[in-house]
Amino acid sequence: MASLKLQTPHSSTKDPEKPTADEDEDISPIEEVRLTVTNTDDPTLPVWTFRMWSLGLVSCALLSFLNQFFAYRTEPLVITQITVQVAALPIGHFLAAVLPETQFKIPGCGSKMFSLNPGPFNMKEHVLISIFANAGSAFGSGSAYAVSIVTIIKAFYGRKISFLAGWLLIITTQVLGYGWAGLLRKYVVEPAYMWWPNTLVQVSLFRALHEKDEQRMSRAKFFVIALICSFTWYLVPGFLIPTLSSISWICWVFSKSVTAQQIGSGMRGLGIGAMTVDWTVVASFLFSPLISPFFAIVNVFMGYVLIVYIAIPIAYWGLDLYNAHTFPIFSSHLFTSKGQQYNITAIVNDKFEIDMVKYGEQGRIHLSMFFALNYGFGFATIASTITHVALFYGRDIYDRFRASYKEKEDIHTKLMKKYKDIPSWWFYLLLAVTLAVSLVLCIVLKDQVQMPWWGLLFAAAMAFVFTLPISIITATTNQTPGLNIITEYVMGLIYPGRPIANVCFKVYGYMSMAQAVSFLNDFKLGHYMKIPPRSMFLVQFIGTILAGTINITVAWWLLTSIDNICQDNLLPPDSPWTCPGDRVFFDASVIWGLVGPKRIFGSLGNYMAMNWFFLGGAIGPVIVWIFHKLFPTQSWIPLINLPVLLGATAMMPAATAVNYNSWIIVGTFFNFFIFRYKKQWWQRYNYILSAALDAGVAFMAVLLYFSVGIEEKGLDWWGTAGEHCDLATCPAAKGIVVDGCPVN
């Protein structure tokens, strides 16, 4: 589904066409930037230190390992850079206190002196360590997107791909966008009006962490205490009582009712009343609710209620759309017309293409009601993003982009002139080498990746064309439209019947653009924090290569060592290795690539009407905008963010109702009640608590795997037998026979 980042609803920025005295003094014209970013710099602070390299490389390696490890689990927790941002501070100060200050020479470096400890741990070192960590978390996405291609080939299709092909695929898709992103820096990083709101959160946190801390409960002490509590508690839902991960009490009360379990199951149904005491469930898919603004939580809540508790029940029980009763209400699996799981491998021939004879025998592919409608809402989200941004931010974007050419350099750009810039040939060379290697992959190893050379060039051109406008949208509105559905739809129409070619095209087209935007976002952070540009580039590049290498290594290890990994119908009920994200990625490869959109959403498929969602999504923001113009005094109207509202359930499936229930409740508690009534506590400890909870469960989960999981040792009792909602996956139609389900 299309991805969206969220913006605070109120912007106090001024009209770019109205210069002020602040501008005459070279101060940033953006009020949020003036309030958050300091106008000073100390270029003498060391950044290429032993502390930076050691902590940066270790954090990058650790996050890439943990995020890939968690990617295959039922609750795929993403450890983001904020965890490292918080944890690196006390470690950096500790190293500054214990490392020797002795200076020495390095052979080949002339008379220049070096030291393992050149002085106090400083903010610039801290920023670069966090940039390393951001690469280790694939810029907040968890693991490299292309790993899913390797996973579906090996775990779902049961075919082969070499380690080399997988590694090249991951590295090239992660690095390709860096080339043209570097060439766009002068348009979207240096201008003051390209202010990248998301970076201000990081700047604020860095400044807060580096302020003198004389409180009795220091941030570092609070972090350690919270981490120990999180680490210890995860032993309960992670090993002793896994049922607590989804407390679906309605299923326990109505143990023989299919309808009741469809309503009450937090993992396979609508999740009414379902809750959790497991932080991995709270923070999976939607990330930590502690760092999401409350207005965004409200928009997600409204969209969630609209889709899950209004649209789905009406479509499933009220209208029985597309024979919905024949299939489970909530599932990412694909089905035959008789409600049986579709045998995908049976319709794949020896050339890894669709076998039309076998496809004709099984018939058209059917989706669960939730999966089908969620694709429709995904279409609406894409269209609404375009019209919403055009109507509410179009003039602002245009004015700021035009002003970026006319404006004088602000104080931050002037301060950055003190540092050596990155030569353009670095980016040209990187782009040329990455494209060359990608072409070799598509030509020499085409039997493994399927994508023709022209498909690579088309995907790269598509990403390049969209990178500048999407970067401008992100830099001014903090919303990032995704190209994933568009790329797979286009390739499915042009080159159907080849699933791996489709997902490769999607990854090259979508991820290279997303990586470029993330690269530019980090560069803006470095711009505000006055980090030498060459240091930024090298840290991002090295971090990306290291992270991608560890991602594929960990994925290869798990895919070859865990029996039936990702096969949820063959795994025991308490197994954590169900790969929900990869299941959806696999289904997308079938829908858009193997079978093709024409046989699903076109004239040869069942779901052609879903294309009307494109029109509905495009019209929706127009209606909101008209009401805003008619009733300008009603401040709540512009807070209706339809791209966020319609895309609220974009992560479902693989996310489930219990993920959303707990995320909304926890987020509301901290970002409304605590923020409103205990603001000082929130300012001081909120982000610290989020990082500690992430780190604690991550370390305990890895410890549990290496201590008991790898030996397949565990407990066997009621509390380890899943959420006890087995009937939630059953169809409600009469006469449909499915193993394990009562016949109606």
Image: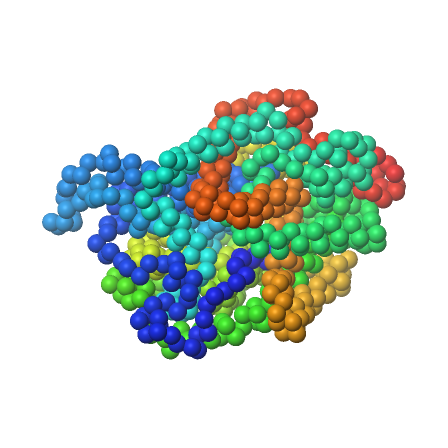
The answer to whether residue 252 is visible is: yes
The answer to whether residue 412 is left or right of residue 470 is left
303 up-or-down from 94: above or below:
below
217 up-or-down from 323: above or below:
above
Instruction: State the colouring used for the structure image.
Output: rainbow
Please state the horizontal and vertical placement of residue 683, each as a whole percent of the image.
45, 47
Q: Foreground residue, 381 or 448?
A: 381
Q: Foreground residue, 721 or 205?
A: 205
Please state the horizontal and vertical placement of residue 107, each as a whole percent of the image.
15, 45
Q: Foreground residue, 326 or 198?
A: 198
Task: Identify which residue is drawn at 84% across, 54% down.
Answer: 319
613 up-or-down from 394: above or below:
above
The answer to whether residue 687 is left or right of residue 281 is left
Task: Identify which residue is drawn at 46% across, 57% down.
Answer: 198
The answer to whether residue 515 is left or right of residue 159 is left
Task: Identify which residue is drawn at 54% across, 61% down.
Answer: 9
Which quadrant is home to the C terminus?
A: top right
Task: Identify which residue is drawn at 41% across, 66% down.
Answer: 30
Please state the horizontal and vertical placement of residue 351, each as a whole percent of the image.
62, 51
